[in-house]
Image (cartoon, rainbow, N blue to C red):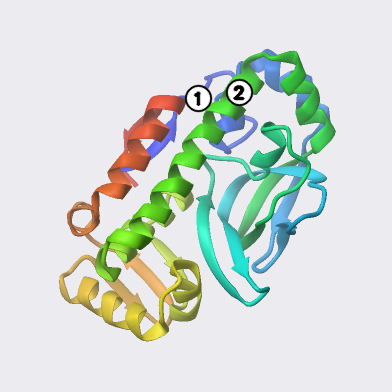
Amino acid sequence: MAYYLTMSIENTLSINQLLGSLPPADYERIKSHVEDVTLDVGQILYPENEPIQEIYFPEQGLVTLISSVDGDSMMEIGLVGHEGVVGYPVFLGGQSSPHRAVVQIAGSAKKLPTQVIKEELQRGGEISRRLLAYTQALLTQVSQTAICNRHHNIDQRLARWLLSVQDCLNQDKFYLTHETISNMLGIRRAGVTVAAGFLQNSGLIRYRRGWITITNREGLKAASCECYGIVRQEYHRLLDFKDSTV
């Protein structure tokens, strides 16, 4: 099962779920500022401690919010896909962030100038409400990820993370190397190899030359910890997510 936002029937111009769920009048107000862009692997959508100039609404692909230590070691603190938006510090009144947003899986997005979003936040209408609701859901993900990294084993953490990636992409096959996963989860590559092997031997995923296929989603949920369910429930509560089959 994957999750979708309830979408306005009239607004089919965007396959990003946040934009797609807006009332037609709200989308029309910002439509002239929307730009279609390609997301390339490794592209930095905003760097650390610099002004956030654009807001991105991914349609395809995966963006990770990354925190680094001493400019070297790094760990993923949040995932954004077609259900969300990149640039949440702006919604909270900030101009920059101590972490960066990086494209991990190539795709596409709709981009808006930050100033347009700030004007909508000042307006206080439906766009503002949805952006702030999404921010609350994303912060739940960030905080629950920190708890998960502290209290759960590598098998559970990898299962949770793969489920989250599947939700962000709305597909059950994607390309991620062991090195990328180890960096994102903050664990050694050998640990990823062992955990992925366990999940594969359990019939939950297939992993070959970087290509991961989720073959048993319900089994993967059972192998995960409660953190996945807590986060998804919050997205559902705040953003009217609906269940569907991938």
* Residue 31 in sight in this render: no
**Is there a contact, CB below 8 Å, between mark 2 and mark 1?**
yes
Left or right side of 2 for 143: right
| Quadrant where the image shows the N terminus | top left
Helix, strand or loop at label 2? It is loop
Tell me the distance, in whole angstroms, between the alpha carbons under discs 2 and 1. Answer: 7 Å
Left or right side of 138 for 40: right
Q: Residue at x 24, y 57 (%)?
A: 224
Would you place residue 116 above or below residue 82 in this image?
above
Could you say where residue 158 lies in the image, as x and y percent from the top left?
33, 65
Could you say where residue 111 lies in the image, as x and y percent from the top left?
75, 42
Q: Residue at x 55, y 25 (%)?
A: 21
Left or right side of 201 for 213: right
**Residue position marked by numbered label 1 in the rendering:** 7
Between residues 178 and 147, which one lies in front from this camera angle? 147
Q: Quadrant of residue 125?
A: top right
Q: Quadrant of residue 59?
A: top right
